[in-house]
Amino acid sequence: MFVDKAKIYVKGGDGGDGLVSFRRELYVPEGGPSGGDGGNGGNVIFRVDEGLRTLMDFRYQKHFKATKGEKGRNKSQHGANADHMVVRVPPGTVVVDDDTGETIADLTRHDQQVVIAKGGRGGRGNIRFKSAVNTAPAIAENGEEGQARWVTLELKVMADVGLVGFPSVGKSTLLSVVSGAQPKIGAYHFTTITPNLGVVDLGDERSFVMADLPGLIEGAHTGVGLGHEFLRHVERTRIIVHVVDMSGMEGRDPFEDWVKINDELKLYNIKLADRPQIVAANKMDMPDSEDNLAEFRKRVSEIDPDIVVMPISSLTKQGIKELLYRVADLLESLPEPSEVEESEQLAKAEEGIVYRFESTKDTDFTITRENETFVIQSESIERLMRRTQFNSYDAVVRFGRILRGVGIDAELRKRGAKDGSIIRIGKFEFEFFEGGSDNYLYEEE
């Protein structure tokens, strides 16, 4: 089964917690703090493996979670960083954030890799909080949570040549004749419902990959029929071989078929209008094909005299060799894929900036009121809360001091907060304590 789309959940590993400990050694009185930092959580990394061709593996496994960093140790020892989780994906995989629709990465080359979910940083141990004022701090931090997100994987087949055309024009038969591929062939529409790949070897040290893509119908750019399931694969091909049934046996006009398919390609992606195209006038062994070909060439030349039309017959192999050599010559004249202008996201991937972890220095906040409860909304403060160990009095005092430093205490007083008022931040509730010049927030028991 060919699977070209999957939705999965990825989560970077949480950072390890920092440790509160003190030196307890013989002949070392008042040894001071010795709690080490926690290790960093592992990243979830996608790496391209050219041996893969589908997203089948993601049909059965949809959750990928990296491991957590190790907790800090005594004697000032740093906890071990967690190993990264490497997830193999086929070339041509596009990674899209399911919530925002943003393209995170476009993975095309073997061994190319990007960080999709970054692991959390390890929490600091109490040795990091030692100062001239506080020489024995009982403060440590929890590890930061790893990034979590749902992503959609879309596979766009990587092929040099893509066969396009209406259903039953002979694309699958052509691929089976020129390569070792064995696509399903039948005398009915939509015999091919998934892309088939074949390697064409010309015997002169030249070869290329050809893709037989599912048949296209009018309205496909809006999702009609196989719609986008087909069109996404055309974007990857360097050359389009447009297969047209020149016999007109089903009562269709070959020229009108050619126009409709090209319109669908342009409506889906305007860049496909500039993609090099060769028209393969198929079924030339059938009656009336010669007359239809002459009329077809005349009408096509009126639109674009540079369009190459090559008569072939997949059944009798007429013109097949000439078509393949023409395709190979055209491929050689085109720039290598690496020379083509890359998308902004791909350029960022090369620079290693595919994912940027949020800064913890942002202290913007809003305060609203729900009856008698004051609700504080701030991503940075909520991250600080998750790192604070509230079972430590010193840690609670430090947390309150930080809130006062960014102006939250003053703003709460302006809005009428008094001694005993309930303050909610995220899932936690605190009691506001008015203590003269010092105002701290304590976790409500």
Image (cartoon, rainbow, N blue to C red):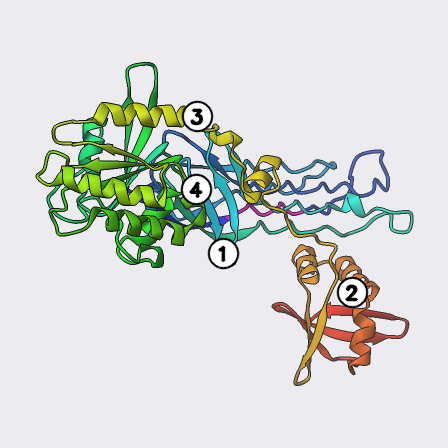
Left or right: 182 as drawn, with respect to 89: left
Q: Report how far apart the C-alphas of labels 1 and 3 lie in the structure.
A: 36 Å
From the image, which quarter does the N terminus lie in? top left
Q: Kindly identify the amino acid type of the residue bearing the numbered disc 3.
A: Ser
Q: Secondary structure at mark 1?
A: loop
The residue carrying pointer 1 sits among few (fewer than 14), some (14 to 19) or many (20 or more) residues within 10 Å by Cα, namely few
Q: Secondary structure under badge 3?
A: helix
Q: Give the image location of residue 437, x and y in percent.
A: 90, 71
- The residue pinned by badge 2 equals 403
Q: Which residues are magenta?
A: 11-17
1 or 2: mark nearer the eye: 1
The percent coordinates of residue 50 (x first, y second) are 40, 30
Q: CA distance from mark 1 to mark 4?
A: 27 Å
Mark 4: amino acid: Asp
Q: Whole-Å distance between the Cαs marked 1 and 2? A: 35 Å
Of residues 390 and 115, the one nearer the viewer is: 115
Q: Is residue 306 in the magenta section?
A: no
Q: Which label's residue is closer to the chain start, 4 or 2?
A: 4
Camera-side residue: 68 or 330?
Answer: 330
Residue 279 visible in this rendered orientation of the protein: yes
